[in-house]
Image: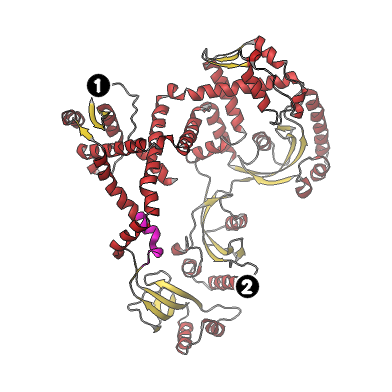
Amino acid sequence: MKLKKVLLGVALCASSLSFSQKTQKEVLFTVNDNPYYTDEFIRVYKKNLDLVKDDSQKDLDNYLDLFIGYKLKVNKAYELGLQDNKKYQMELKNYRSQLSKNYLIDREVTDELVKEAYDRMQKEIKASHILFQIDENALPADTLKLYQKVMDVRKKALAGEDFAKLALKYSEDSSVTENKGELGYFSALRMVYPFETGAYNTPKGQISMPIRTRFGYHLIKVDDVRPYRGEVTVAHIMIAKPKDTLNTVEMAKVKTRVEEIYQKLKQGEDFAELAKQFSQDAYTNGKGGVLDKFSSGTLASVKFEDEAFSLKKAGDYTKPFETKFGWHIVKLIEKYPLKSFDEMKSDIEARVAKDDRSTVIAAAMTEKLKKQYPLVTDKAMYAKAKATVNDDFYIVKWMLPQSADSYNATLLTINNDKKYTAWDFLEYVNSQQKSGITAKPVSRLVEILYDKFSSDKLKAYYDAHLEEEFPDFAAVMQEYRDGLLLFDLMEKEIWEKAKNDSIGLQNYYQAHIKDYQWGDRVDAEIYSSTDKSVVEQARKYLKKNKDAAYIKSELNTKDKVSVIEKSGVFPQDSKALPQMDKWKTGVSDIVNEGNYYYVLKVNKVLPVTAKTLDECKGRVVNDYQQYLESTWIDNLEKEFTVKVNQDVFAKVKKQLNQ
């Protein structure tokens, strides 16, 4: 997906649409007699002049070559008919849907809701609730009756009755028997919007008025309010669980290893050095176990997060603890407060779009569109259509009239342009029978459905005319269109070929085998300690061909881990190894680096050798792809006829160089 974004970025540099002030244009070049004009070339060059880092691309002759190369690829894509591919068309449709979202919201209302959410993020609320279920389209009389019941329960709570017991007795939340209504801590954008608002507007220790959400009515008791926990940077040492977690022997070894490391930490040994030597998190052990900073809810383990946030001062570390991934020891590096509003705005806006707040935004947008595009309803046709709907709708047995002829007259007109018939509306009604709308009586049901129908069609009309309303949207859509097409072309002509052309890949590998070599490596056992005498003793045991189990049993005790060993095949420049002037088989001399002493038993010194194709296939495929692409343009130039109008290009160069 990242690669696709890069190619779309390339397409942004070569859009054939221009909505700027019209200038006189001439044919700059042709590809198989398809003309490409000066105005497009000039616009694209100016647009990207400050973006390109390679000065050679600023040279107009070089830039023309790049521009022609891009157009050759686009022509090749169309020649292959890639624009007719259903997958391409679907992706283009999806991209348009994503791009149009920014145009389909009320910006003013959205900004207000985003700012409100950020302000609420400063705190985390701990609350309990009692839920009284009712359909969101219930009759007013039923709603009022339930409201009075909720108020009666609220009076009991205010009079001092235990809220948890009231929740067990009255709440219709399915989880109440387990949690007694307790919801734990939450912040903005974690609960449905009306509930969140009710919780944040209720002081600590108090009980809210009835809060209406799509689930029904809630009474909310705010048990606690605490500041947002912020973000942290920590380092960790992880010893992974064995694949077979039912193997008690292997599981015990993992726990023993992490306890050994913890003991060495308590003895004053360096966390980063121990992480480098023993942590099995390959992404962090090379940098002392340091993780990227994170906030609550970011990681896959709540236990890990809670342990990390429990640390108070930089340098503090936890006792060993277990997660589903293995055993960890976590050290606090730094704590960070909530990010600024500007830093978080785009992320919050994306979350608001998926939150209940989106209904508030949608309603505001609908009202705005109604002013922009007049809606006209034929009252006679509406009454005729309405009369066909009966109570069968509620049991999903309502059927369309037998003939559409009587309902093909216009019911709804949008902007004196787009028309929908009564039959269109009745088909919509039919499609909504399983939507769960239960509003009664039927006349009210039809009103709700018609409001939804007209709003949906209004938004669809606006969406369909975005290119006309917003030239910048039209331009970006053209850029996406070409970018996606180019991606499909590259996939077909370069990437898939590199993966599937086994003979070509083998030949390329053989021709460049010197680029795919194993460096010098050693098969070794490494013993380390901060106590030189311990390492000296370990060296004596190694000289006597004693194994790791024997050495550790002799030098370590229950209360003190004096030595730890590590074995395997390592590159000679590995950070897990001490630096050696010369590598040879046998037991090494004692090596001192920093606070640590090392002794190694080198079983084998492995020389530089060529990797097999299987060992380096990913890199070879990548290099082969680059090779194929470098020769591709030359082939396209032979396949297509390109004619450059040099006189016109000379005028363009003069204009741009002024």
Q: Name the residue under label 2.
A: 252
State the residue at coordinates (56%, 81%).
556
Q: Seen in the image, is 636 located left or right of residue 210?
A: left
Secondary structure, mark 1, is loop
Name above or below for residue 417 compared with residue 459: above
Residue 17, above or below 51: above
N-term-proximal mark, 1 vs 2: 1
Asked whether 139 or 490 is in front, the reply is: 490
Q: Which residue is drawn at 23% across and 27% down?
A: 27
**Circles 1 and 2 in contact, beta carbons < 8 Å:** no
The local crowd at label 1, few if under 14, some if 14 to 19, many if 20 or more residues have their Cα within 10 Å, is: few
User: Which three-letter amino acid code belongs to the residue tagged 2?
Assistant: Ala
Q: Where is residue 220 in the image (x, y as percent from the top left)?
A: 73, 38
Q: Nearer the viewer, residue 269 or 453?
A: 453
Q: Where is residue 445 in the image (x, y as percent from the top left)?
A: 72, 22
Hey, which quadrant is residue 606 in on the image?
A: bottom left
Examine the image and state in which quarter residue 147 appears. top right
- Examine the rendered structure and indicate whether residue 520 appears above or below residue 221: below
Q: Does 172 lie within the magenta span?
A: no
- x%, y% of residue 164? 79, 45
Magenta-colored span: 611-622
**Residue 24 - label:** 1
* Prevailing secondary structure of the magenta residues: helix
Q: Is residue 618 magenta?
A: yes
SS under mark 2: helix
Tell me the kind of residue under disc 1.
Answer: Gln
* Residue drawn at the location 60% of the way across and 39% of the way down: 189
The quarter of the displayed image where residue 20 is located: top left
Query: Cα distance, mark 1 to mark 2?
Result: 80 Å
Residue 370, x across and y down, in percent: 56, 17
